[in-house]
Amino acid sequence: MAVHVTVWDDRDRAGEGRTPTASMAPVTPAAPALFVHNIFSWGSDSTYGFAGQRPLADSRRLLLMDRRGYGDSPDTARSDFDVDAEDVVEVLGDGARAAGPGGAHLVGHGNGAVAALIAAARRPDLVRSLALIQPSAFTAAAHHPVVAGLLDRVRDGVPGSLDGVTPEQYLRASTEGLGMDMPEPTSRRLRAVATSMGERPVWEAEIPLEVIRSAALPVLVICGTWEPAPAAYREHVGLPLMAVAESLTDSLAGRLLRVPGYYPHTQEPAAVNAALREFWG
């Protein structure tokens, strides 16, 4: 496999080793869930990743994929959502085979949700459900004025504007520069930031919504309310992300869950986990 996958499985095995009896009904194993992280992060990261979803491992196997250039996955010359989507398909295939027929649940956050959407369109037979946490699928909502404004700004960016900027400087500008706390600049974090700085822009992604619609996949979209976010962060990032969440919910006939804050699965893990349990059930 080209990428690293952290596996969490905390299911109670107290019954293992008992002698089967005629009264014991066979138990169908719960389908696994694959998580795909956003920028600056990795699968099991406690700051921006899915550490807060560990309680969900009490009922199913959780697969936390580190995208190329992140976490324990190998380096890459340039992170690319199309390549990530192929990696997601590979991990989905392995997880689905291990669990039997029916596929696996797929969860993506931010740029990881873009890869999840593309992967689901390529192999919908491997996907049991699709949960998108603040997906950065801006091109899928380019008709919305707020999103169109964001796309105009980023596409008109100055070429080479990051030349000479270190990962630590970029991390500081992306957090403290917007009024938020900066996480500790460990070597692991700075590697993730460096990869993020060179990612292929998500506004180049073509999201095959019609294919996903045709597959009739259950879709859950989770978005923050962004009320307590720093004003600049809410205006330039939050409003477009909320518009994308609403647009995808409509386009894919999904369900939209709004939770307080601007990093739903880390700031409100109990609410997000409860929603995922219900959704998967």
Image: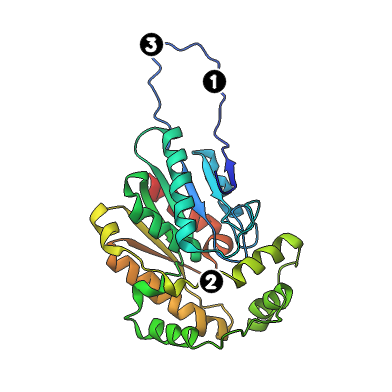
Indicate the position of residue 19 as horizontal and vertical percent values. 50, 11
Circle 2: is it few (<14), some (14-19), or many (20+) Cα within 10 Å? many
Q: Earlier in the sequence, mark 2 or mark 1?
A: 1
The residue labelled by disc 2 is 262
Q: Residue furthest front?
A: 77
* 107 to 193, vertically: above or below: above
Circle 1: is it few (<14), some (14-19), or many (20+) Cα within 10 Å? few
Circle 3: is it few (<14), some (14-19), or many (20+) Cα within 10 Å? few
Asked whether residue 278 is in view, the answer is: yes
Number of dots carrying numbers: 3
The residue labelled by disc 1 is 16
- Secondary structure found at label 1: loop
Q: Earlier in the sequence, mark 1 or mark 3?
A: 1
What's the amino acid at mark 2? Answer: Tyr
Indicate the position of residue 55 as horizontal and vertical percent values. 56, 46
- Secondary structure found at label 2: loop
Query: Contact (CB < 8 A) between labels 2 and 1?
Result: no
Indicate the position of residue 223 as horizontal and vertical percent values. 45, 68
Report how far apart the C-alphas of labels 3 and 2 lie in the structure: 51 Å
Q: Earlier in the sequence, mark 3 or mark 2?
A: 3
Instruction: Please give the name of the residue rendered at 45% of the width and 80% of the height, measured from the top-left corner.
Output: 239
Which label belongs to residue 22? 3
Residue 100 quadrant: top left
Instruction: Please give the name of the residue rendered at 44% of the width and 79% of the height, measured from the top-left corner.
Output: 240
Indicate the position of residue 31 as horizontal and vertical percent values. 42, 39
Instruction: Please give the name of the residue rendered at 58% of the width and 56% of the height, measured from the top-left corner.
Output: 68
Residue 261 quadrant: bottom right
What's the amino acid at mark 1? Answer: Glu
Instruction: Please give the name of the residue rendered at 75% of the width and 67% of the height, measured from the top-left corner.
Output: 185
Asked whether residue 31 is in view, the answer is: no
